[in-house]
Amino acid sequence: MLDARNLTLTRNRRPVLTDITLTARPGEVTALIGPNGAGKSTLLAALTGDLRPDSGSIHLNGDDLATLPPRALAARRAVLTQTTEVAFPFTVAELICLGVEASPGPADPALIDRLLTEVDLPGMAERPYHALSGGEAQRVHFARILAQARRATTPQGPVWLFLDEPVSSLDIAHQLLVMRRARRFATEGGGVLAVLHDLNLTAMVADRVVLLAQGRCLAAGPPAEVLTDALLSEAYRCPIRTCRSPASGPWLLPQMAGG
Amino acid sequence: MVALPLPDEGSRPKPRHITLVLLALAAGVSLLSLGTGAAGLPPARLLAALSGIDALTPAESLILHDIRLPRLAMGLMVGAALAVAGALMQGLFRNPLADPGIVGVGAGAGLGAVLAIVLGGLLPPALAALIGGQLVPFAAFLGGWIATLILARAAMSGGRTSVATLLLAGIALGALAGAATGILTFLADDQQLRDLTFWSMGSLAGASWARIATALPLILPVVLLAPLLARALNGLALGEAQAAHMGIAVERTKRLTILATAAAAGAATAIAGGIGFIGIVVPHLLRLACGPDHRTLLPHAALLGGTLLVAADMIARTLTAPAELPIGIVTATLGAPIFLWILLRRRGLAGI
């Protein structure tokens, strides 16, 4: 259980997060959505322990985040950041190895090859990271955090994936591939919290949606309750109409604005 | 960041093989260095003595034990310290061009040394007696240490390491230290002038077991314990936030790395003067040879750094024999073109 209460965070004297309370459950994919500058990445940074909130509390599996040492934290959560610049000429396998070493416990020797196949980069282990395209690089980092979170649950409780725009550089097929893999992680008992921009994708993969706007939590709940015309229009400050699609899940949101 | 030139896919040699090659190289160069010099102890005599065929005369034994061996030990130690400090600093700043000599630490140490040479006589006698003959190394170490701390403070503001700030702060620090050194040079008398000029160009000529004993307690722990920072530095290569996500205590790593760099580079500069480019060339060559993993990079850097400096020292001793070239001239002549080559290969790419 990820449990954040009354988070307030100020940066450069500007309030970025105001009184945010949210929970995310293991076994579910929780999507964090909202317009640019709503505070999604800042909230994620607070939830992963990168930024300390000015007030409020965060508990991960019942433990106060502020009291967990880095090693213990790395054993129960892995984080995919928006961008990762790699300073030295590492190979793909060496990078994924960093993920393996980041959490305790044995790893299957075939883990790296298996993960590379899962993110559709089979046989790329010895490639230099810097020769990869943007989308390939993003999938390598996804594989790296999957290596860190190679077990979805541990005796200490569920393991969490925090994903900040995990599909921003990916084509549609790989977007689905990555989100389905995250979904499978939740099915195996882990928790997933993902910042997403694509509302269609959100409707498709999320069990719960948290809608942020201007540093506040506007709504939280199942997609059907949050992805509504009124809430989305208010949050994104532009008229948005949602449509129902009986075939492919509860909602489909064409990128439609107007009237 | 950008790609450095890489060997073809899958052609990286095994780290163990590289270790063996480096060990063999170190042993070979060391033997060659012991058999090279102005006084008469040729390699043939050395080999004969080593293999037990023939005993050394007392004079030869003196040359070996009091001149060549300490010089070899100091070369290995200083080279290892400079290369490891360079690798640590590059890992910390996530930039292959960072080097204690380039970013102002050398200038800080130089200022400390010149201060001691020129103004050392003004110290209260009690303090002078306490420090004894080690005043110059001590002051150089202090100067390098202070420069490192200023630099780290300047480059790591706001929780991020700005490489541009680092290089600019290094230039500013170097200019300031240079100006202060200039003033002291102006004040110095003839003997002091000679001392400080030779100090600034670096040399292993002052090698003695006593000198080695003063620097070893600072250098040996850094060289031996640096690999403990390897996992953290590997993580830092992805960024500070990413390293923290992988369970690395980032602030502690940064502080330990700065401390280790200042200790090793400061002590090396203190006893051997300003020797440039070892810290930048050695890690770069090793990354080309077997990848950037700090677990192998740091011990290999110690081996290759020591070997290269001993080789440079041989060149310095033989090129103008019986006189000696300052070793800093040799390393700069060999190292500066390599540094330029790295820069030019990266030109037009982001990240510097």
Image (cartoon, rainbow, N blue to C red):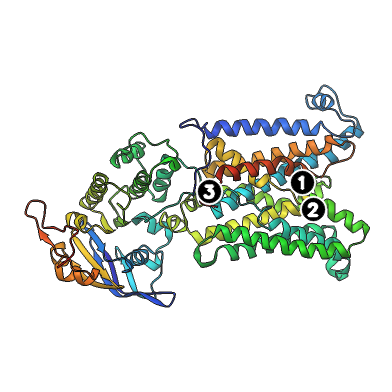
- Disc 2 marks which amino acid? Ser
Reading the image, the residue beneath label 2 is: B200
What residue occupies the far left of the structure in this picture? Answer: A246
| Chain bearing mark 2 | B
Spot occupied by residue B1 in the image (x, y as percentages of width and height): 49, 49
- Disc 1 marks which amino acid? Gly
Eye-nearest disc, 2 or 3 = 2
Of the pair B298 and A103, the residue shown nearer to us: B298
Which numbered disc, 2 or 3, marks the residue that appears first in the sequence?
A: 2
Spot occupied by residue B329 in the image (x, y as percentages of width and height): 78, 44
Of the pair B149 and B217, the residue shown nearer to us: B149
* Mark 2 vs 1: CB contact within 8 A: yes
SS at mark 3? helix
Of the pair B194 and A241, the residue shown nearer to us: A241
Reading the image, the residue beneath label 1 is: B328
- Residue at image position (41%, 40%) is A93
Which numbered disc, 3 or 1, marks the residue that appears first in the sequence?
A: 3
Same chain assignment for discs 3 and 1:
yes
Estimate the spatial distance between the alpha carbons at disc 3 and disc 1, rounded to whole Å: 29 Å
**What label does residue B230 carry, if any?**
3
* Mark 3 vs 1: CB contact within 8 A: no
Estimate the spatial distance between the alpha carbons at disc 2 and disc 1, rounded to whole Å: 8 Å
| Chain bearing mark 3 | B
Picture quadrant of residue A37: bottom left
Dot 2: within a 10 Å radius of its alpha carbon, few (fewer than 14), some, or many (20 or more) residues? Answer: many
- Residue B6, can we see it? yes
Estimate the spatial distance between the alpha carbons at disc 2 and disc 3, rounded to whole Å: 32 Å
